[in-house]
Image (cartoon, rainbow, N blue to C red):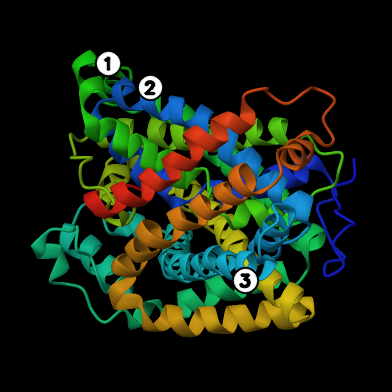
Amino acid sequence: MSGKNTTTPAKQDGFKSQWGFIMAAVGSCVGMANVWRFPMLVSRYGGLTFLIPYFIFAIVISQSGMMEEFSLGRWAGYGPVGSFGKAMENGGKSKKAGELIGGVPVFASLCLGIGYSVIMGWVFYYAKMALTGELVAMGNDMNVIGGTFGAVAPEAASLPEAIKMTFTTGGANNFWIILAIAVSFLIMILGIAGGIEKSCKVMIPALYVLFIILAIMMPFVPGSSEGYKYIFSLDLRGLLDVNVWVFAFGQCFFSLSVAGSGSVIYGSYLGKDVKIRQSAILCALFDTSAALLAMFIVIPAMATTGADLGNGGPGLMFIYLIPVFNNMGGIARIMFIFFYVAVLFAGLSSIINLFETPVAFLQEKLHFNRVTATAVIHIIGVAIALTIQPWTSQWMDMVSIYLCPLGALTAGIMFFWIMKKDTALAAVQEGDPKPVMHWFLSFGKYVFVPLCAACFILGIVFGGIG
């Protein structure tokens, strides 16, 4: 089936198939937080006690916010700026005001992509060390392990003082940041079908194959059984803990990538025959399954040594898992290779989605050609990424707490509150013979949009929830 949206004069490219779109959309959702943050939260809040609220929110968001953003982009044929403007115009309001508001998610996507580039530098470096055997050579020496990470990561607020003291200026990561952004550039200049779709149709299945192999290997590692017992534990009293619901919501909200940017721009490349609801369900299933696979690898692995999974964040993936894998003997090297290559694919598929929104903006509004727009964004990206290394954590917090929830909130308002009811229903219904849920618009208006507002407020109150 065709995935190309031919209604958009500024773009002559699009997804060639629904499967290609789904793989690209899944790539935008499956990121490194699936690997380091999801298992940590499951451990912190108690197995099924955390997973039950997470599953609930995955259903809620996929059946409202994800459908809305895909539909908005496809209906308008543009990214956030053009889509918001067209939505405002459809609702009898100022098109220019809508386009101005649409600049928020475009800016947020650029900022998030820049921060992600720094982290991708770490991933490229560790994938290289996994392939060369350097990670195995570190053994269990935490001074060596911490010092190695410190050579590429100039800030580590969540790490022990003994490790933080080893951190340098981060100059060792410059090459790897440039490499990560260069790879993103090379993929993106090939276009939507030729670059993003083709690369994601390779990277995302490969990611799952690698994670599945690791998950199958884990039960045969002595001591891993305690990790599985914990994963399937349920504390009914824990379900009364507000923190469980807040952080399950935050993790799901950001994991499903509803921020008024990436899902909107990918939607703008969709053909009229693609089923929006089916695509949203499949994206949520694939994203959640990736997080669950990471959980079935990381928690049993940590259980083999009795390590504290509460040490979350980047430290979990780049420091605390090193001695865990090295304690697995002869399979350590293959564990490292499969794990870090899978994470590399997850990160790359996310970063190209984040940069696609500002690239499309330059194409749509300034009429840059594809190569020029992609080059401008990546040059800006690498210049800022090299500069913000000592403040990567603060940079990412600023984007995730303030900008991303505002992008999701404004997109939700445009679709559920501003656009005409008949127009919105037709947008989500197009291409699907099965009638859209009769409660879809009311649910989005009175549940999803308030949840976006809650994400913004809770993020400020809790200092970040995703």
Residue drawn at x 39%, y 58% is: 400
Q: Which mark is residue 18?
A: none
Image quarter for residue 421?
A: top right
Image quarter for residue 230?
A: top left
Give the image location of residue 451, x and y in percent.
43, 40
Comes first in the chain, label 2 or label 1: 2
As measured in the structure, the alpha-carbon distance from the residue carrying label 1 to the one carrying label 3 is: 43 Å
Q: Is residue 45 above or below residue 360?
A: above
| Mark 2–mark 3 CB contact (< 8 Å) | no
Comes first in the chain, label 1 or label 3: 1
Which one is in front in this view, the residue at disc 2 or the one at disc 1?
2
**Within 10 Å of the Cα at label 1, are there few (<14), some (14-19), or many (20+) other Cα atoms?**
some
| Mark 1–mark 3 CB contact (< 8 Å) | no
**Within 10 Å of the Cα at label 2, are there few (<14), some (14-19), or many (20+) other Cα atoms?**
some
Q: Which mark is residue 234?
A: 1
Q: Which mark is residue 52?
A: 2
Q: Which mark is residue 358?
A: 3
As measured in the structure, the alpha-carbon distance from the residue carrying label 2 to the one carrying label 3 is: 36 Å
Q: Secondary structure at mark 2?
A: helix
Q: Amino acid at mark 3?
A: Pro
Q: Nearer the viewer, residue 19 or 4?
A: 4
Give the image location of residue 285, x and y in percent.
58, 30
In this image, 442 relative to 193: left or right?
A: left
| Mark 2–mark 1 CB contact (< 8 Å) | yes
Residue drawn at x 38%, y 84% is: 387
Image quarter for residue 142?
A: bottom left
In this image, 26 relative to 76: left or right?
A: left
Q: Amino acid at mark 1?
A: Leu
